Amino acid sequence: MLVAALLTGCSADTKPPGMDSVSPAPALSATDSANSTPAGPSLDPSAVACTHSIGGASPDPDGDGYRLVLGAVVLPSRVLEVHDAGEPGWHFAKHGLVLRAGTAVELVVAPEAADDARIGWGSPGPEGTTIRVPACPQAAGWLAFAGGYTVRTPMCVPLLVRANGREERATVSVGKPCPADRH
């Protein structure tokens, strides 16, 4: 019942920009949820619950302002618009997290920006400088989670993206353009 309430609470405007064909994710039973989140959100405060997925669709990482990182995470390559975060001194850029189903992913705000940027996804989900998503199952092959980036001032948010036993540094333009990532 809690799963149904969480999925019902997601409105259409929580879909990541450019994800026209995001379809609802199938509801997971309590057993599926427990199995898909090995540490469980109560044991790992940085973990996003699989049940918080708002759907999934095969993204076009080369179009519509997106890029694919490590074959598993789709990040925005365009400048995200910032708004008042409702917390003095902070701004928020709403942008969903899209990732390949069945792949455990960790996103970390690089240490040099840890005092000025936070990330968070889920309904509600964790917010901080490290976010982990377990290897969630999904028939469509991709998952999407509502959330975004919280920053003190518009900035280039440096992220360490970890998936499939690899790590890649990426930058997200939050409120201001950033130089292109070097691969």
Image (spheres, grey):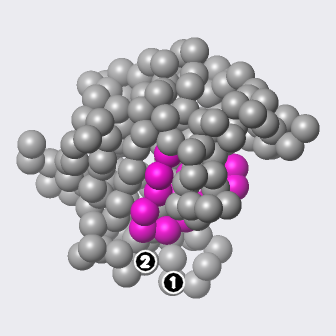
The amino acid sitting under disc 1 is Gly
Separation of residues labelled 1 and 2 (CA atoms) = 6 Å
- Specify the quadrant that holds the C terminus: top left
Q: Nearer the viewer, residue 34 or 61?
A: 34
Left or right: residue 108 versus residue 156 is: right
Residue behind mark 2: 152
Q: Earlier in the sequence, mark 1 or mark 2?
A: 1
Residue behind mark 1: 89
- Residue located at (55% from left, 32% from top): 136
Q: Is residue 152 above or below residue 23?
A: below
Q: Position of residue 130 (x, y in %)?
A: 43, 63
Q: Which region is colored magenta?
A: 120-133
Q: Position of residue 76 (x, y in %)?
A: 35, 42
Label 2 neighbourhood size at 10 Å, few (<14), some (14-19), many (20+)? some
Disc 2, SS: loop
- Residue located at (20% from left, 52% from top): 169
Q: Position of residue 147 (x, y in %)?
A: 57, 51
Q: Is residue 66 visible?
A: no
The amino acid sitting under disc 2 is Arg
Q: Which residue in the rendered view is the most extreme toward the left?
A: 182
Q: Which residue in the rendered view is the most extreme toward the top?
A: 139
- Residue located at (58% from left, 84% from top): 88
Q: Is residue 119 visible?
A: yes
- Residue located at (69% from left, 55% from top): 124
